[in-house]
Image (cartoon, helix red, strand yellow):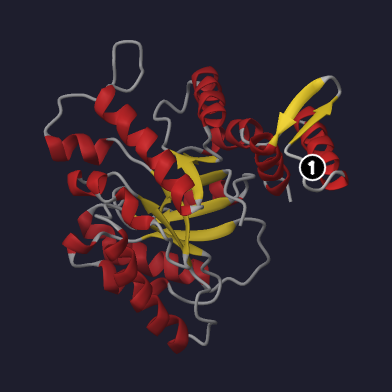
Amino acid sequence: MKLRSMLFVPGDSEKKFAKARATAADALILDLEDSVALEQKATARDHVASLLNDDTPRRWSFFVRPNPFDTGLTYEDLAAVVKPGLGGLLIPKADGAHDIARIAEELDRLEAAAGMAIGTVKIAVVATETPIAMFNLASYTPPHPRLIALTWGAEDLAAAIGATGNKEDDGQWTSPYQMARNMCLFASAAAGVLPLDTLYANFRDAEGLEADCRRARRDGFLGRIAIHPDQVDIINRCFTPSDAEISEARKIVNAFAAHPGAGTLGIDGKMFDIPHLKAAQKTLASVN
């Protein structure tokens, strides 16, 4: 499943959904959590469920962000949205892999009731939104069979620890949130799932978003959360390998295939070894 860009859409807004579905986002996340007021939760749940009944072919994957366990709404959300057409869930405020096991157990039951193959609905996790979650990032390894991605969040974590802010004057994350970002990246790599960068809040700052996405891809992230339709094309462009990168990756993979057992090869005057081969294989996998 390609997840360069995952665009949030409030679950109670037909207007915003109509705009979102016209974008080139790889996934739309219909939100039942933070973007929906408490008194609108039931309305949003019904609206999202009705959207899932539309079997018109779509080029994007349909995700839902349910409410977290401490709200008492999680199982109602799942019961409403687990049906054919749902590609995945984005789980907020997870404390660790044990929360994913709870979700997965309920998914098994709901998929069976809906006539869906067990394991159809995949899981992505916002893995850094509670203090205890920071200590449990290693619990995602080995990964649950449904787990496909980890991302991180700063706002809920800041509120949980009583921070008065999470950005420096120049807009960079302060050290606790740099650590959360980095640990999410390492946890994703350890589990072998997609690392997705968090949202870029200033949706009018296209230049800043592009620069931040390029830093994220340099560091190893393979996609990003979007909060506005205008961010999608920038995110897709930044997380899509260039023609030159693809060409070099093919050369590396083909050269090692032609010399099985080689640990180091010279290609076009440069030396490449096994880490370069692994990186090239990941590059090619990201465009297939």
Picture residue at 22% right of the left edge, 39% below the top:
157
The answer to whether one can see residue 212 in this image is yes
Secondary structure found at label 1 = helix
Q: Position of residue 203 (x, y in %)?
A: 46, 28
The relative height of residue 112 versus residue 229 in the rendered view (above or below) is below
Picture residue at 28% right of the left edge, 73% below the top:
75
Q: Quadrant of residue 230?
A: top right
Specify whether 161 is left or right of 211. Answer: left
39 or 279: nearer the eye?
A: 279
Specify whether 7 is left or right of 129. Answer: right
Specify whether 11 is left or right of 259. Answer: left
Specify whether 209 is left or right of 144. Answer: right
Q: Residues within 10 Å of mark 1 (few under 14, many from 20)?
A: some
The answer to whether one can see residue 226 in this image is no
Picture residue at 56% right of the left edge, 27% below the top:
218
The relative height of residue 183 versus residue 35 in the rendered view (above or below) is above
Q: Position of residue 94 (x, y in %)?
A: 28, 55
Q: Position of residue 85 (x, y in %)?
A: 56, 71
Given the current orientation, which residue lies at the most extreme left position?
162
Count of numbered marks: 1
The relative height of residue 125 versus residue 119 in the rendered view (above or below) is above
Instruction: Indicate the amino acid at tag 1.
Output: Val
95 or 16: nearer the eye?
A: 95
207 or 271: nearer the eye?
A: 271
- Give the residue pinned by disc 1: 253
